[in-house]
Amino acid sequence: MRNEEYEKVEEKQRESVEMEENGHAREREGEGEVEEVGGCLSKYMDDGSIESHRYYLSRRTTLEMLRDRGYSIPSSEIDLSLSQFRALHGHSPDIDRLRFSATHSSNPSKRVLVIFCGPGVVKVTTVRNIAGQIVNKDTLTGLILIVQNQITSQALKAVNLFSFKVEIFQITDLLVNITKHVLKPKHDVLTDQQKQNLLKKYNIEEKQLPRMLQTDAVARYYGLERGQVVEVTYSGEITQMHVTYRCVW
């Protein structure tokens, strides 16, 4: 009887040891899974500077914006990867090297210049320096300033003295291309002839069309002027596809 009791005790001890070992094994497996997940997430970590990343994203959005306005923009410039951008400009890009100009595809007389401003407040001296650096002002029809801080009222007055159109964007507004958002309807800018055909078709006047403010994000993206008409196409799973028109005011 005692031998049987000893055997039962030893059997329980073996079961206890096996359960403990199995528990440690599961813990090790769990730790292994954590390490594996951590390794996967590390691939998406950006070891570079935030500064260079911001310049890269805003520059790419600006290139896409000008392409959508009809300017000649090489695909290789838009498709440039972040690592390639950093290889060219480093982790602390020189803003003077980031500036570029573009010519309109259908109207070569239209040329726009893009200039990045530094992180400081944009003062009137900054605007004067920019004006002094611009060559061939007579052939320039547009200037885009990308700023990272506020711009003083005196600087705005100085900007208004330019003989061409000047657009000012905050760099944070260009980190994402708003027209690529899945919930954003498709916008197509009508030509003057298409606009006249639309008004004639529905026998209406320009002021009877729904309005879009010139300060609207989409209007600013396309650089729309007062009086231009945009065709807006809505499509989705809940609502059926329908088209409406908006006039910029």
Image (tube, helix red, strand yellow):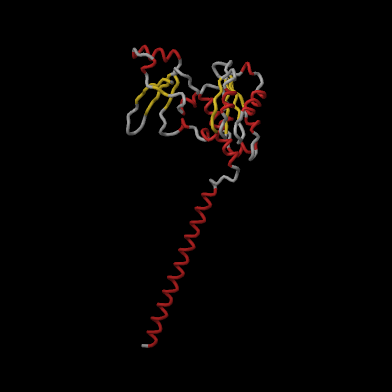
Residue drawn where x is 34% and y is 33% of the image: 237
Q: Position of residue 246 (x, y in %)?
A: 40, 21
Residue that sits furthest to the bottom in the current view: 2
In the image, 248 versus 92, the foreground residue is 248
Residue drawn where x is 57% and y is 34% of the image: 149
Q: Position of residue 81 (x, y in %)?
A: 58, 36
Q: Position of residue 247 (x, y in %)?
A: 41, 20
In the image, 204 versus 34, the foreground residue is 204
Residue drawn where x is 44% and y is 12% of the image: 193
Vertical order, 132 against 43 (above or below): above
Q: Position of residue 30 (x, y in %)?
A: 47, 60
Vertical order, 79 against 198 (above or below): below
In the image, 176 versus 45, the foreground residue is 176
Residue that sits furthest to the front in the current view: 154
Q: Quadrant of residue 117?
A: top right
Q: Quadrant of residue 114?
A: top right
Vertical order, 121 against 207 (above or below): below
Judged left or right of residue 249, residue 124 is right
Judged left or right of residue 15, residue 98 is right
Q: Quadrant of the C terminus?
A: top left
Residue drawn where x is 57% and y is 37% of the image: 54
